[in-house]
Image (tube, rainbow, N blue to C red):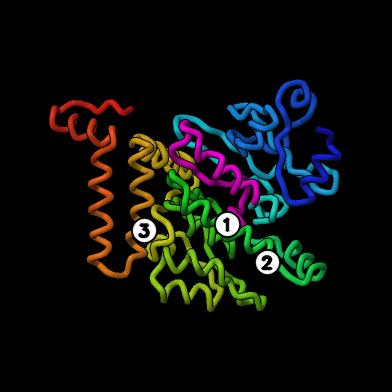
Amino acid sequence: MQRSQLAARWAAGRLHVTPIGSVAARCRPKVACQSLMPRVCAQRGVRTAAMGWVRALSSGDVTERMLQAVVADGVATLTLMDNKKRNALSSQMMAALKETIQGYEQDTAVKVVVIRHDGKVFSSGHDLKEINLQQTTTGTTEPVFSLCSSLMLAIRQARFPVIAEVGGLATAGGCQLVAACDLAVAADTATFSTPGVKIGLFCTTPGVALARALPAKHAMEMLLTGDALTAQQAKEYGLINKVVAPDELRSQTAALAHKVAQAPAETIKIGKKAFYQQSSIADLGAAYSYAQQVMVDNMCIPDAKEGVAAFVDKRAPKWL
């Protein structure tokens, strides 16, 4: 496929994969990914193993590298790389994240995903220049906020846990991204805020994630004042799990990710889905009824049978 064709399709809002081999050897990769958009790759004969490259194109030009993905030992590490835009959640960035995460659904090598960042800012939230342009040219910003919501849902609905690794500022949609993740580790230098109220654009969609991660009054205080939380405050409020020294952030996050990845993938999938499902059931009896059936069904899968048998036999389990 010619570059002009790729550019035209990217302008329509789609990401495309550059085949590896001679083309990739001649071109500097702009976004390194593994298992990105497997359906598209399969249709075009593109390999989706450890050597795939994704190119984000806009108006015929290759954009700066935005997202890097590496899979090792069951953990996929996604690094936000758009430093010039402070890792803003532009449509391109959100589409890349969403498609990569969804692409891992069928990749048995991935049991945990970590979202981290290059540079001093985790994410500055939505690309306000893009939003302003969309509003003035089309009269609506529905596409960008719809894409954002679908990204957050992709994280919540993923079969694997997603961990945020935050070493700097996470604001507005960036704070939403942290709150949407299942777990979060932050450096003691990180800060978190939802300052939309200060520019007349209330952080309503970030509030969806915050309301499910923080007590209501803490979430409302963040949304109404726009004030930043320190990492320690974020931990006390429940937004993140752990605060570490900056030079320990990567190792501590990796240790957590690999610890989670030791469990059977099917068990993790069942447990994550059931946790969020039962927590949305208001009636306590109904929640227990749902959860007990999940455990009954869980006991029927091979990994559970092996795990219980290994415990009884006082041996290490051999996961299938």
- Give the image location of residue 254, x and y in percent: 44, 39
Disc 3: CA contacts within 10 A as few (<14), some (14-19) or many (>=20)? few
Q: Which mark is residue 277?
A: 3
Q: CA distance from mark 3 to mark 1?
A: 18 Å
Residue type, label 2: Glu
Residue nearest the viewer, comparing 101 with 237: 101
Q: Secondary structure at mark 1?
A: helix
Q: CA distance from mark 1 to mark 2?
A: 12 Å
Residue type, label 3: Gln
Q: Secondary structure at mark 3?
A: helix
Q: Is residue 108 above or below residue 202?
A: above
Q: CA distance from mark 2 to mark 3?
A: 28 Å
- Give the image location of residue 114, x and y in percent: 50, 43
Q: In the drawing, does residue 273 fall left or right of residue 36?
A: left
Q: Residue at x 61, y 56 (%)?
A: 123
Identify residue for label 2: 142
- Give the image location of residue 12, x and y in percent: 77, 51
Identify residue for label 1: 150
Highlighted magenta segment, given as a residue range: 95-123
Q: Is residue 239 above or below residue 161?
A: below
Residue type, label 1: Ser
Q: In the drawing, does residue 56 fall left or right of residue 297?
A: right
Q: Is residue 310 magenta?
A: no
